[in-house]
Image (spheres, grey):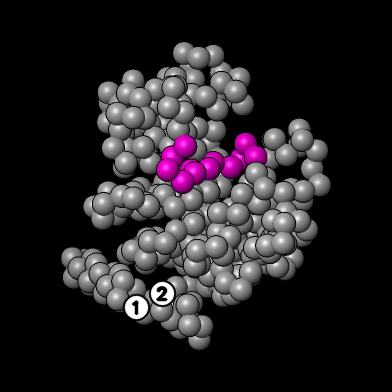
Amino acid sequence: MNAVAKPQTAENVIEVRNLVNRFGTQTVHEHLDLDVRRGEILGVVGGSGTGKSVLLRSIVGLQRPTSGQVHVFGKDLLSLSPDQRSLLERRFGVLFQNGALFSSLNVVENVAMPLIEHAGLSRPDAQQLGSVKLALAGLPAGTETKTPAELSGGMVKRAALARALALDPEILFLDEPTAGLDPISAAAFDQLILTLRDALGLTVFLVTHDLDTLYTICDRVAVLSQKKVLVVGPLDQVAEYPDPWVQAYFHGPRGRAAEEAHERDAKSVFNASP
């Protein structure tokens, strides 16, 4: 069931203006603008090479853009001192592609790391809180002492999500969180993100190719194309945008299947209502 769209007057927690990213002679973004509203789940889609992950990294401070402005919580990220930026970035949680867990650490040690490094907790306290975050991410007891190599793909994603939640962030950045998961695991992960957003009041910036994810949990969708945000809005409006890639993506076989599955789910919820 789709999340409820946020009102147009919702506060922007991220504002990107005139963003340019160049790598040598290659221009990935040219005068890109994007707003992210407090409490929403924004899905970011686009073809290969459109710079979805580069945009995410520019917003979280891992990629310094060639030019432009990135304001987060009203602060210009690019003009902050290192100490000021570090404080701001503690309000972010990031789940990278493939989880990016430390292979030499067990699961709870991975989650405890930011609590030790950034919150100054002792190792025992950090690991105790890390166990709570693992439970919040839906991992069963006994997972704490396993290494990443011993986990399934879905469990790796949940462990990485627990680490992203370690410092109680206000904005959660997810880079292809359901990539490589089977449909059941992907659907369960989507529902977990929706539950966490509602329970913790998170804002979620979600890079994905997964049409089921877009239909199930995203309040708005932004399409990257032609080096900018081509269109952004509720999915039903974006899907009608007269662009060849947009039409092929949302109205091709996979798009139609995702839309039909969403409509079936919506009808079943409606029919089950008293």
Look at the image and tell me in which quarter the N terminus lies: bottom left
Label 2–label 1 contact, CB within 8 A? yes
User: Residue at the bottom extreme?
Assistant: 242
Say which quarter of the image contains residue 183.
bottom left
Mark 2 burial class by Cα count in 10 Å: few <14, some 14-19, many 20+: some
Residue drawn at x 48%, y 24% is 112
- Label ID, residue 252: 1
Q: Position of residue 215 (x, y in %)?
A: 37, 67
Q: Which mark is residue 166?
A: none
- As measured in the structure, the alpha-carbon distance from the residue carrying label 2 to the one carrying label 1 is 6 Å
Near mark 1 (Cα within 10 A), the count class, few <14, some 14-19 or many ≥20, is few
Q: Is residue 79 left or right of residue 202?
A: right
Residue 139 position (above or below residue 109): below
Q: Residue at x 81, y 47 (%)?
A: 79
Q: Secondary structure at mark 1?
A: loop
Q: In the rendered image of this protein, does residue 5 appear above or below residue 22?
A: below
Is any atom of residue 131 visible in this view? no
167 is higher (above) or lower (below) than 190: above
Q: Nearer the viewer, residue 20 or 263?
A: 20
Q: Is residue 17 left or right of residue 108?
A: right
Q: Amino acid at mark 1?
A: Gly
Residue occupying image coordinates x 20% and y 68%: 268
Let me know if residue 95 is in the magenta part.
yes
Give the magenta-colored segment's residue range.
89-100
Tag 2 residue: 249
**Is label 2 in a helix, a strand or a loop?**
helix
Q: Tell whether 258 sits left or right of 47.
A: left
Residue 100, x across and y down, in percent: 47, 37
Q: Is residue 53 in the magenta section?
A: no
Any part of residue 206 in sight: yes
